Amino acid sequence: MNTSLIKLADKLATTNTLSDEEMTTLLKYRNKEITEYIFSQAIKIKEKFYNKKIFIRGTIELSNYCKNDCYYCGLQRSNRFIARFRLDENDIMKYCLDGYDKGIRTFVLTSGDDYYFTENKVASIISMIKSSFPECSVQLCLGERPASSYKKWFEAGATRYLLWHETANDSHFKKIHPADMSLLKRKQALWQLKETGYQVGSGFMVGTPYQTVADVVEDLAFIKILDPQIVHISPFLPTSHTRFEQERSGNGDMTLYLMGIVRLMLPRVLLTADPALENVMPDARRKSFAAGVNEVFASLAPDEVKNYFNVYNKRHNIKNCSGDDVTRMQKKIEESGNTVAVGTGDYIYAPKEENIYGQVYRIMRP
Ligand code: SF4
């Protein structure tokens, strides 16, 4: 038994923080024993706040157009080898209705940074969803937008916003993004989202080219400071027609280990399992639940739409990364010994009335 690693895990579980040096040790000397110990603590903490409940969020991919050129992403604007699509409002409402009938109560509108979906257009889609499904919540994943758009969409009824910081280290950010993108702007956008009142989601990929242990420690330190309500960690997957297409995938075991660490760092967080994990290890969902995950995505779109997002390299036998459908996901949750959470989970992070645009939340047990 490596007592020094166990002591670090105990310190993280009781104080929710470690110094950078301590975190580096925990990452560098990862082994089977400490992994199992961290997972056992992560499960205890998750079940203290959420019992065995796992939330399923229904994803609707609005568009795979993007104005950006992130080097790792198959949706980058320079990729001329993928077919592009956009949904119209009728399709969006149809997928919401299908999802609602299957029990989905959170709709995640996601796209590349596609300004075809203007501030007003998105606000009108949110309003339509909220008026048809008033008890449902709308979660956005539409990239970096002006603060005025974040505010307008929040006022239209969206309550959550996902924006991955991707990497908290500036020099690493520059190695995987073009010069017209900025980590500072990304971090500012995350703070603006928090100030607007959203439940904010952030995260990063494991195993991106050039990533070092120090970068991952910085990612965790940034997550600790940002204190997001949702954290999303996924393995890097090499994608066709990108400059990283010949690179290796990120390590699934390390991804799970980091999920466990995040659960110890932010006990009440909504910790998401990305469908990408399925592509680097067998039985990934069940393993992620055992590492402290309590939120998954299920795609509400039919296969022909999902395929537009299926941009990974066939050389790696990559499966669809948009997520399982709702019924399959419900089955996987039940089979893992967990239960499908009912409702949106918004009550977990209900903003204090007097602080609707602030960063302080009243925490309630579901
Ligand atoms: S990661 Fe996001 S912003 Fe970057 S190219 Fe892909 S879809 Fe666009």
Image: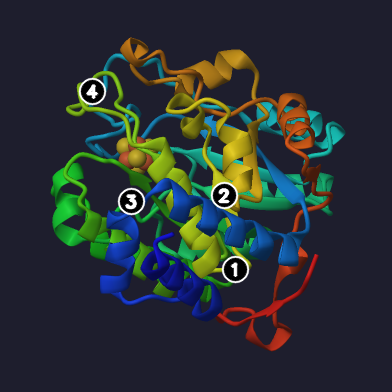
Picture coordinates of residue 224, whole percent (x, y): 43, 71
* Any part of residue 73 in sight: yes
Between tags 2 and 3, which lies in front?
2
Which residue is the extreme one toward the bottom?
A: 354
Gap in angstroms between the C-alphas marked 4 and 3:
18 Å
Q: Earlier in the sequence, mark 4 or mark 3?
A: 3
Circle 4/circle 2 CB separation < 8 Å: no
Depth check: give the residue in front, 37 or 147. 37
First in residue order: circle 1 vs circle 2? 1
Whole-angstrom CA distance, mark 2 to mark 3, is: 21 Å
Vertical side of 264 occupied by 140: above or below: above
* Apparent side of residue 235 relative to residue 70 in the rendered image (left or right): right
Residue beneath disc 2: 291
Mark 2: amino acid: Ala
Give the residue at mark 3: 166
In the picture provided, is 10 more to the left or to the right than 27?
right
Q: Residue at x 25, y 72 (%)?
A: 21
Q: Pointer 4: what residue?
A: 245
Amino acid, disc 1? Pro
Mark 1 lies on residue: 267
